[in-house]
Image (cartoon, rainbow, N blue to C red):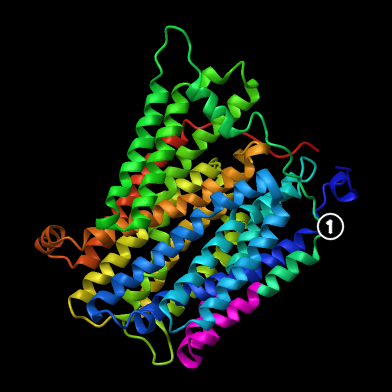
Amino acid sequence: MSHTPEHAEGRLPRQIAYIIGNEGCERFSFYGMRNILTPFLITSLLLYLPEGQRALAAKDVFHSFVIGVYFFPLLGGWLSDRFFGKYNTVLWMSLVYCAGHACLAIFENNRLGFFAGLGLIALGAGGIKPLVASFVGDQFDQSNKHLAKMVFDAFYWIINFGSFFASLLMPLFLHHFGAAVAFGIPGGLMFVATVVFWLGRKQYVMVPPGPPEPHAFSRVIRTALLTQRPGQARPGLWLAVAAVVAALASFALVPSLGFVIAACIALVVLIGGVGGGAWLQMDRARGVHPDAAVDGARNVLRVLVIFALTTPFFSLFDQKASTWVIQGGEMTMPSWFRAAQMQALNPLLVMLLIPFNNLVLYPLLRRAGYEPTALRRMTSGIAFSGLAWIVVGGLQVVIDGGDPLSIVWQVLPYALLTFGEVLVSATGLEFAYSQAPASMKGVVMSFWNLTTTVGNLWVLLANAAVRNEAVTGSIARSGLSVTAFQMFFFAAFALLAALAFGLYARRYREVDHYRAA
C-alpha cells in the first residue's frame, strides 16, 4: 500500500468517519430490538405459556439469540479471511441483517416468522461483528498506531451513543405504538448503517484475503497434532481425539437440555481439547512451518486462555437485558416509565466513563506508580461485575421480603457493572486485535466474540438447573428465592474468575501485531 500523507505524518485516517457512522446506526438497530426483546416475549409472543413459565422461557429465548449473535463471528471471520475480505463480507451480511429486522416487524404475532427473523439477525450481526472492529485496525499502521487506542475508544463510545437512545426510546415505542413500529425503526437504522458503510468504499484500506495461507493457524495446529516423531508418544493427538468424541457425545444432551446448550458444550469441549492437544505438541510443527507461524499459533492459544477467563463476565453482563429487566418490573416506578429503559443507564455511563478513565483515572494511577495495563484493567472489570451482582442480589432479597423498592436502586448495580464493562469490553477489543498475527486477525476477533456465546451458555445452564426439583429444593432450604440465589451464584462465579484471570495475566507476555509503517 502506498503511504498517504495521513500515514506519513501519523494522522487519523479520514475514512474512519464512515466506519464510526455505520457502527452508531448499526448499534442503535441492534440494541433497539435487543433491549425490548425480553419484555415483548413475556407480554406478547409467549402468552400461550402459563404465566409462571413466561419469564424463564423469555430468558432462554433471549440468551439463545445472543449465543447465535456471538457464535456466527466464527463464520464471518472465516469467510472474510479466506474468501471475500472484510468489506464485502460486512456489506453482504448487513443485507441479511436488514432482512431479519424486516421479519421482526412483519411477524410480530407469528412465532415461526419472528424466530426466523431472530435467526437472520444473529447471522447478520454475528457475521459482521468480528470484522468491523478489525476493519478499523486495518486503517492504521506503525506510523499512526498511537491513534488507534483513541479510535477504538471512540468506536466503543459510538456503540454506546446508539445504544443509549435505543434503550431510552424503544421501550416507549413498544408500549405506545406496538411491536411493528418498535422493531421496524431499528430495521430502518440498519438500512441507513449499510448505506453509510457503502459510501466510504473508495477510501478504505482493504487488506485482501489472498490465497489459503500455508502457515495459517489451523494448518499449524493440524501439523502439530498429526506429526509423529520416532520414539515419542502423541498425547496431544489423543487429547484432541478424545475431545472430538466428547463433543459428539454432547449431542446426547439434546433431549434434556436442548440443541443450543448441547451444541455450545460440544464447541467448548472441541476448542479446549484440540487447542490443549496442539499446545502439548506445538514444537512438532517447527521445520514444517516457519518459527514465526508456530510462535504465532502458540500465542493465539495463550490468548484463548485469556478469552476463556472473561466468559463469566459476559454471563453477568448480558443478563442486564433479561434478569435485571424482570427484576425492574417488580419494583416501583412512575407510570410513564418502563423497566427496560433502565438499560439506557449502561451506555450513558459508558460515554462518561471512557473519557473519565482516559483523562483522569489512568493518568492518576500512572502518577501514583501503577500502570493500568490492558490485563490489569480486565481483571478489575471482572471483579466489579461480581460486586454489581452482590448488590442486585441484595435488592432481590428485599423485594422477596415484600418491601416495596424503587427502581432507582438499580442505578448502583448498573454503575458497578458498567465500570466493569468499560474495563473489560473496551479494553478487550483493542487487546484482541493487537495480539493477533496478521493472517489470523479475523479468526482471533471471532474467538473474542465467542466469549459472549460461552458466557450466555453459563446462563442457559443455570436456567436449566433451576428447573430441577432437587436443585430448587436445596435453594429453598437456604432461605433465598431461586432468583436471589442465582444472583449471588453469578457474583461468586465472577469473583473467582477475576482471581484466576489476575493470576494468569501476571505470567502473560503481550505482543505487538500492528502493520509495519
Q: Mark 1 points at which residue?
A: 203
Q: Which residue is drawn at 74% across and 39% down?
A: 515
Residue 416 makes an appearance in the image: no
- The magenta span reads 161-190
In this rendered view, identify the residue nearer to me: 91 or 376. 91
In this rendered view, identify the residue nearer to me: 490 or 9. 490
327 above or below 356? below
Quadrant of the image for the C terminus?
Answer: top right
Return the x and y of residue 202 as percentages of the image width and height. Answer: 85, 59
Residue 308 position by quadrant? top left
350 above or below 212? below
Residue 336 makes an appearance in the image: yes
Q: Residue furthest top?
A: 231
Judged left or right of residue 225, residue 159 is: right
Return the x and y of residue 406 as percentages of the image width and height. Answer: 33, 81
Judged left or right of residue 58, residue 149 is: right
Q: Principal SS element in the magenta part?
A: helix
